[in-house]
Amino acid sequence: MSASPLPDDWATAPSGARLYDFLCGGKNHLRAERTLGKELLERARWLSRAAKINRAHGALIAQHFVRQGLRLILDLGCGYPSLSNALRNVHEAAASISAGVTVVHVDHDPVVAAHARALLTGPKGHTRAVCADVRKLDQALVPELDPTRPWGVLLHDVLPWIPNDLEAHNLLADLRARLPPGSAISITHLTADMHPGDVEALAAIYEEAGLPVRPRTRDQIRELLDPWPLAEPGLVPTNRWFDDRLLSQIQDERSAAYAAVAWHPSEPR
Ligand SMILES: C[S@@+](CC[C@H](N)C(=O)[O-])C[C@H]1O[C@@H](n2cnc3c(N)ncnc32)[C@H](O)[C@@H]1O
């Protein structure tokens, strides 16, 4: 893992990773995130549930990818490892299906990457944590990611934190250009489609706190995944992607996000 210096205000300026951990009920947050998190929850009480739905979806997708035969998983913008049994980490979920899966966790926050490395469990040779900005994929692609075998990539609740549309499109285009045949990209993405007033108000609070976030519409999110075909059920509220599980019983509004899986066109699903 490359060592990145911490910014001088790392403990006083709110961090997106620590805020998400706060919303998920974790312990990796400081006063700045607790203050901001409480302000956000006062405006939209559903936000904590939405964060937990997103986190739970990551574990389910990891298992789904492994069941589909993928053995290399790239978790871009991984966030702090969860210590809760209820919210399993991607590498733990993958390992619950097959012991032979390699998971590479990537985050641009050096503290997240350090935590990910320290808290990795299971066979050490099968997990790796990298500190890198996903917009510079060269820095994230470690030798464990064999270019001759298909990868399953998770980009869960990361694209809203890349508010510049051109950068977001370039990241997806770069990924598609590099992924071996048989690979898949899973995304989740915040949207205002379900709670227009609330999400606009939340975005203004985030912006004010120095954390610009970009909710996108369903059409804008679909465009990011073009031209790869989407697996069934397509681009749907995150809680609905998996058919017969607890998440699908939750109201769509609670997820406030869409999820989709796009497969390399060489491998129609
Ligand atoms: C909302 S959290 C999502 C965490 C995890 N993917 C999940 O779904 O549970 C977003 C994470 O993306 C990371 N992140 C945001 N922009 C990034 C970038 N340009 N490069 C790498 N990581 C990024 C943040 O540090 C944070 O940990």
Image (tube, grey):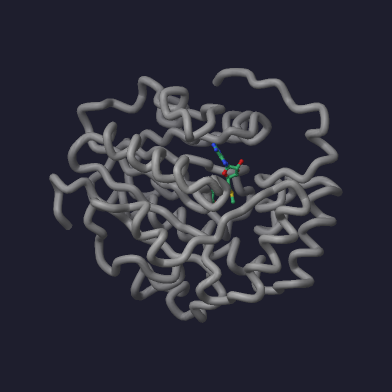
Q: Is residue 8 above or below residue 150?
A: above
Side (left or right) of 148 relative to 49: left
Image quarter of the C terminus:
bottom left
Q: Position of residue 245 (x, y in %)?
A: 40, 73
Query: Residue visible at 37% across and 43% down?
Result: 172
**Compared to 259, does 212 lie above or below?**
above
User: Quarter containing ligand 1?
Assistant: top right
Image location of residue 232, percent across then percent down: 25, 66
Residue 217, percent from left and from top = 46, 66
The quadrant the N terminus occupies is: top right
Of residue 94 and residue 224, the one placed in the foreground of this image is 224
Q: Is residue 91 visible?
A: no
Q: Is residue 118 visible?
A: yes
Pick the front one: 214 or 118:
214
Residue at x 56%, y 35% (from the top left corner): 107
Q: Quadrant of residue 174?
A: top left
Question: In the image, is residue 192 above or below residue 67?
Answer: below
Dividing the picture into quarters, in which one does residue 143 lie?
Answer: top left
Label total for image: 0
Q: Residue at x 28, y 32 (%)?
A: 178
Q: Is residue 201 left or right of residue 176?
A: right
**Residue 173 at what x, y percent from top left?**
33, 40
Compared with residue 50, is residue 174 higher up or lower down, i.e. above or below? above
x 22%, y 34%: residue: 180
